[in-house]
Amino acid sequence: MHNLLSSLRVDINSSLYLKDPESSSLGINIVKSSIDLIDLHGIEEFNFKKLAKAIGSTESSIYRYFENKHRLLLYISSLYWGIMEFQTVVQTNNMPDGMERLMKAVETLFSTPQTKCTSFEVEGQKLRHILNSEFVKAYHHKLVDEENEAGYFSIYKRLALRLSEMIAGVNANYRYNNSLASLIIEGSLNQYFLSEHFHNLTDCHSKDNLYEFYKDLLTKTLTS
């Protein structure tokens, strides 16, 4: 797994940036430091002035890479989903049993992204924490339809489609495979958020709890 991921480069929509961050050490540092700051302070308190101070550069240098912090958040989100998609493909490859394959995909989605094997050698847990707290803010806004049309969420949607196809592979007669796939992906973030902030609204307080919950749900839904 590590060897396969060692040269991973996520193909992120080029409209999200003005200059490819992976093309220079400054660009890589911008993304890495952004992840650190957003994880620490949240997207509302984060701005390019604070980022410039953190990396010892200027705001204008950051604006050469990203138009605004919303685009940067979308870039970070795409990076996360791209890593998770790749891990899912690798972990489920050559698994003939449909249910085992689906559950392995679910287990993988609940794991920590292998970010250290990309250009952005940040803590995978920080990236996951950002997605848990901030991803909903990336698309709950007035311009979401335009951004969707522009392909800003293509990696996220592609991963959902992969799950949907796995669900259909388990039970071709199940009519709600797209909805169930979305529920799994959203749950991979939301249940962690609930556990951290609204403890009594979920029974899933660990990766194992979460996996067992979805195993129970999917088994009863698709095989009963």
Image (spheres, grey):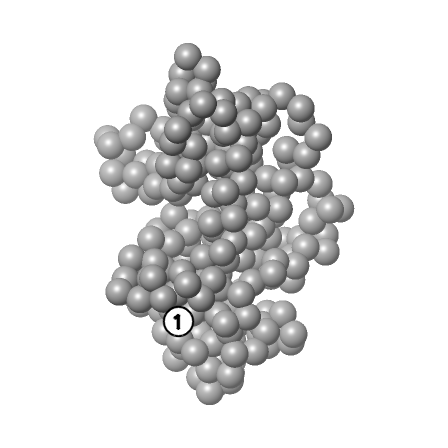
Q: Residue furthest right?
A: 3
The one nearer the camera, 45 or 101, is 101
User: Can residue 218 be spotted in the picture?
Assistant: no
Give the side of residue 102 with respect to residue 23, left or right: left
Q: Residue at x 28, y 42 (%)?
A: 197
The one nearer the camera, 63 or 57, is 63
The answer to whether 185 is drawn above or below residue 144 in the figure is above
The one nearer the camera, 219 or 6, is 219
Q: In which quarter of the image is the C terminus?
A: top left
Q: Quadrant of the N terminus?
A: top right
Q: Residue at x 25, y 38 (%)?
A: 198
Q: Where is residue 16 in the image (x, y as percent from the top left)?
A: 48, 70
Q: Position of residue 151 (x, y in %)?
A: 47, 62
Q: Residue furthest top?
A: 224
Q: Position of residue 218 (x, y in %)?
A: 43, 23
Give the side of residue 135 with respect to residue 208, left or right: left
User: Can residue 11 be spotted in the picture?
Assistant: yes
Q: Which residue is drawn at 64% across and 35% down?
A: 91
Element type at marker 1?
Answer: helix
The one nearer the camera, 7 or 168, is 168
**Which residue does the numbered mark 1 point to in the structure image?**
69
The answer to whether 76 is drawn above or below residue 200 in the figure is below
Q: Which residue is drawn at 71% across and 30% down?
A: 94
Label 1 packing within 10 angstroms: few (<14), some (14-19), many (20+): some
Q: Label 1 is placed on what type of residue?
A: Lys
